[in-house]
Amino acid sequence: MFQDKGWILVTLITLVTPSWAAYKLQERYSWSQLDFAFPNTRLKDQALASGDYIPQNALPVGVEHFGNRLFVTVPRWRDGIPATLTYINMDRSLTGSPELIPYPDWRSNTAGDCANSITTAYRIKVDECGRLWVLDTGTVGIGNTTTNPCPYAVNVFDLTTDTRIRRYELPGVDTNPNTFIANIAVDIGKNCDDAYAYFADELGYGLIAYSWELNKSWRFSAHSYFFPDPLRGDFNVAGINFQWGEEGIFGMSLSPIRSDGYRTLYFSPLASHRQFAVSTRILRDETRTEDSYHDFVALDERGPNSHTTSRVMSDDGIELFNLIDQNAVGCWHSSMPYSPQFHGIVDRDDVGLVFPADVKIDENKNVWVLSDRMPVFLLSDLDYSDTNFRIYTAPLATLIENTVCDLRNNAYGPPNTVSIPKQAVLPMGPPLYTKQYRPVLPQKPQTSWASSPPPPSRTYLPANSGNVVSSISVSTNSVGPAGVEVPKAYIFNQHNGINYETSGPHLFPTHQPAQPGGQDGGLKTYVNARQSGWWHHQHQG
């Protein structure tokens, strides 16, 4: 009898547990500190002895997946970073803490060799044509240590031959003394030559468009939507209070192609809780740089504690974005109004997802999330006896299941919206990671949580552990289960004032081998962090 009552109690508890309480993202790789695949032990020892390799100075900030390779970027914010553009061979390293392999080789990662190498890379993007787009910022250091040995340059690699096929230096008119470019979005149109890249100038407050076919770029400047919100510059992550009040346009995502042949670019300033949108019809037109103010659309705020640095949208209109205040990844189905009740949490982890720096969706609709505890690295001290950097993955369909973003089951979904009660300001002190799987609430800072019970396992387990696989489980083109029709992703959305029309997943253009053209070289950038009162970003050159 008592056993039956106990079973009933457990059942009831299970039923009322919030849908996001079950881990969905699975940990694929993790490191306490990054390691690099030197040609041999002797060279590695030499690099350690000379200071060319300082393991504690390396922080991963960007991730991208293609085939059997998982790309990871490591900016040269501090000395001792041997390579900035790297990858993991997923056939050789199924899980664990693999060494990072320089891409395409060691020589191409030489700092300061502007014409032949990449000095610092941040966010990267693989397009539908098998090309890897990398923005080399040409910088070494961060904050008042920043130097610019090389100019900003776009590098594009053909992933079938692992060769660079384009290098384009941004002209001086496209940047200014404050320029800091952190994110890239790539827009493929009718074919692989009809390609554009967009770059968010976070501190110069601009948006740069680049045409592959024309090999030319132009800048949209000084739109008020590119600027930070003065009321949204206060951050609390891992028990650290800091201010990134000058951070403007940052994360970007692109919609599927609409019926007019163009996409919608969504973006947010980092110091903001609001999203904005503009048609790529405007961005692709060089003549509209000065007279397009009213073509940009302001959407609603996401709610409190909803700063975001990275976002991506699937080919059927589901946007994922990191929520750095909440140690979480959020979602929004773009056929719905952009308001808090239509934003969901797909996963949250107050240990493993402290600062989920980058979020990507690959060609097989698998999601990849990189977390790196960046504010602790920049403003405090990481514990290198602990796991600090993680890469998670899960099928997109699994992540959105039973959330407000899953329109297959319920247009409104469970009450798992992005907004949470505003947190009290936490004092500066030791990093605070709460082990409990729940929103972070004010509490006494912990100096150690080794004695706390571990969270549910996120360890990646292959379907057949006897076989080495090169990717996680592959979902079909439809997000829904077999036989279930996925609703149209886009409708005329009067709430947002933008016309979204498509009847299904965007059909990618025919893959054409990328043709060598233009100059040969590189491009890329990422988040500038500083603490109010003592940290400021200084640009030179």
Image (spheres, rainbow, N blue to C red):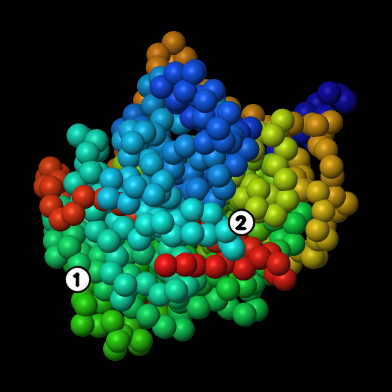
Q: Earlier in the sequence, mark 1 or mark 2?
A: 1
Q: Could you tell me which residue is drawn at 66 percent across and 44 percent down?
A: 349
Nearer to us in this view, 76 or 231: 76
Nearer to us in this view, 136 or 41: 41
Find numbered disc 1 in the image and state the secondary structure of the residue it sits on: loop
Is residue 321 shown left or right of residue 183?
right
Residue 286 shows up from this direction: yes
Instruction: Name which residue type carries label 1.
Output: Asp
Q: Could you tell me which residue is drawn at 70 percent across and 54 percent down?
A: 379
Is residue 173 shown left or right of residue 532?
left
Residue of label 2: 324
Image quarter of residue 325: bottom right
8 to 291, vertically: above or below: above
Q: Could you tell me which residue is drawn at 33 percent across and 78 percent down?
A: 220
Is residue 404 shown left or right of residue 430?
left
Residue of label 1: 260
Instruction: Name which residue type carries label 2.
Output: Ile
Find numbered disc 2 in the image and state the secondary structure of the residue it sits on: loop
